[in-house]
Amino acid sequence: AHLDAIARLNPALNAYITVLPEETVLAQADAADARYAAGTAGLMDGLPIGIKDLFCTKDIRTTAASPILADFVPPYESTVTARLLKEGAVFLGKTNLDEFAMGSANTSSAFGATTSPWRRTDAPDVALVPGGSSGGSSAAVAAGLALAATGTDTGGSIRQPAAYCGIVGLKPTYGRCSRWGVIAYASSLDQAGPMTRSVTDAGLMLEAMAGFDERDSTSASRPVPAFHKAVGKSVKGLRVGIPTEYRAPGLPEDVLAMWEQGIAWLREAGCEVVDVSLPHTRYGLTSYYIIAPAECSSNLARYDGIRFGKRVDAPSLDAVYEASRAAGFGPEVRSRILMGTYVLSAGYYDAYYLKAQKVRTLIRRDFEQAFETVDVLLTPTAPSAAFAQGENQNDPVQMYLNDIFTVPASLAGIPGLSVPVGLNGAGLPLGLQVLGRHFDEETVLSVGGALE
Ligand code: GLN
């Protein structure tokens, strides 16, 4: 059924970069059936899912939506996808994304933009973005081209596309899932997580994905609880903080109204709702857009035309580097590399990069202080519903502003869940974000379940 849906809808949505051959998918499904019959079914046995094309998959092309990796076939499997396979998941294909996961609209893919399956009721002819960078995953799950999908989140790339497409997206605590075999964007921020139709599914899939991995020195040596059991648990007596700084001036009425609705639901469920302050919130975006490009410029130095991916032949070694990188990187990636090398360069390192790292510590402390008095925080996931394809495209700052509510949690490394809570006046989904303490995904999922 999912393959049929892909055949029917993927030409219009472009949610998948690579769809696996029918025989390959059905063979995986048959193997799952056999395990089920033998009583050895895994946690995800037979569940058909999409994999963001940033996870290396053995013998399956993995592009990061970049020309430089357009023909890259990894000889190894990422830890997260290996775990999903071990738990019996059936892979349908590799989903579209912004090039190297840099973006908020899935418009910078070398394989073409992904289109959201949603339309405004007052402008049904206007194509909307699915959010980004995991926009292929969010569109695929929302349109029924996968039961669930993997995403990665550096500054919001799981949560924001989930909100735009009306699905659930969970960015786990930094270190919860191994980054081994996930093509790096900004290593101190990158984290893999599930994108699903329900909060229970998100818990189940995280359980399959998470866990210590000796091949990733930043992966956490923590037991993996039965996350899905946290969903449906009573939230009575939990303290929910509303960060006053997130009531940003100019926040649209529909987003505010949905936030109030979420607060009311949690009160009804027995939560105590209190205002809290995260005073350094307004420096989140600026420090993120210094740190993430700095790390990206360093991570992407490995694409030199020699060791990986596309090579353009030229008369000297330097010329090979230059020609390969010029042909291999799209405009957004190039601008991030330039920003990153600039803020890391000798004369500017202290003024930008070091300063941003200090601000990052202050942001993390804001959260630590808040979590001394509350169990979770509730905010909107994004400052608006999905926008039209092409909008914000020539104004990078406007595009970066989309991440205003998601980047602080990324900088702090705490878990964040986006839950679809309703539709706005134009019939588009809006999401609320639940943030929790480091490694307390269980409470986050319980509160998410109460909002669903
Ligand atoms: N939109 C943010 C960026 O472009 C976040 C992307 C992400 O989380 N991968 O950096």
Image (tube, helix red, strand yellow):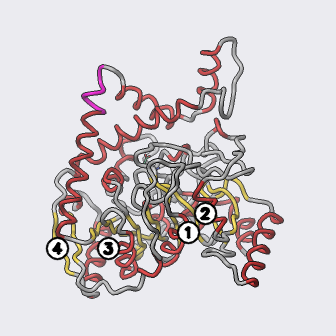
Query: What residue is disc 3 on?
Result: 258
Of helix, strand and loop, which one carries label 1? Answer: helix
Q: Which residue is mark 1?
A: 208
- Do the residues under discs 1 and 4 have CB atoms within 8 angstroms? no
* Mark 3 surroundings within 10 Å by alpha-carbon count, few (fewer than 14), some (14 through 19), many (20 or more): many
Rendered view: 273 above or below 383: below
- Secondary structure type for disc 2: helix
Disc 1 residue type (three-letter): Ala
Q: Which residue is mark 4?
A: 274
**What are the residue bounds of the magenta stretch?**
347-353
168 and 373: which is toward the camera = 373
Q: Is residue 448 left or right of residue 306?
A: left
Question: Mark 1, mark 3: which one is toward the viewer?
Answer: 1
Q: Are marks 1 and 2 in contact (CB under 8 Å)?
A: yes
Q: Residue at x 50, y 68 (%)?
A: 206
Q: Nearer the viewer, residue 394 or 362?
A: 362
CA–CA distance in space, label 1 to label 4: 34 Å
Q: Earlier along the polypeptide chain: callout 1 or callout 2?
A: 2
